[in-house]
Image (cartoon, rainbow, N blue to C red):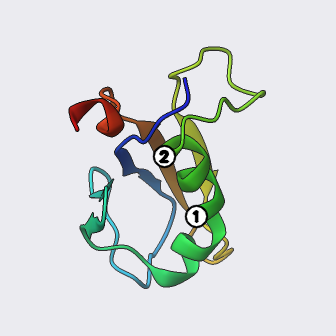
Amino acid sequence: MKGLYRVKVTVREVNGYCRAGHHPGDEVIFDDNEVRGKICFDALCSFISKVYARRYGADLPWLEEEDAPAFHPCPDVGGPVVFEIRRLPGNLLERE
């Protein structure tokens, strides 16, 4: 499903104290040339490759379904946060 997609990253779990202040339900949207929402820089650096993959339509071989979300743990061992990375429907290239 190659194309250009919006990607939503949602905080699913916070196990302990998050020094960035993330809470379950927090969202960040990667949309064309804009990023909306608050995100910890350390976490962003650790999962940005999954965002790029989902953004450009790559299928991740470990996901059972093409549009299933990918989950990613924060690298902070003191208070790990679990993020859900989901490709949103609608190819942005088809809007042009």
**Which residue extends farthest right?**
61
Which residue is at 69% across, 74% downward? 77
* Alpha carbons under labels 1 and 2: distance apart: 10 Å
Q: Which residue is mark 2?
A: 55
Give residue 31's position: percent from left, percent from top: 29, 55
Number of callouts in the render?
A: 2
Please report whichever mark, 1 or 2, sits nearer to the chain's N-terminal start.
Answer: 1
Front-lying residue, 57 or 43: 57
Reply above or below: 70 against 68. Answer: below
- Which residue is at 24% across, 68% downward? 37
Query: Looking at the image, which residue is at 53% across and 43% down?
Result: 56
Q: Are marks 1 and 2 in contact (CB under 8 Å)?
A: no
Query: Where does the image place residue 57, in percent across and percent down from the top left?
Result: 55, 35
**Quadrant, the C terminus:** top left
Q: Quadrant of the N terminus?
A: top right
**Callout 1: 10 Å neighbours few (<14), some, many (20+)?**
few
Please, what is the three-letter code of the amino acid marked with disc 1? Ile
Seen at 45% across and 75% down, the residue is 17
Element type at mark 2: helix
Residue identifier under label 1: 48
In this rendering, position of residue 75 left or right of residue 85: right
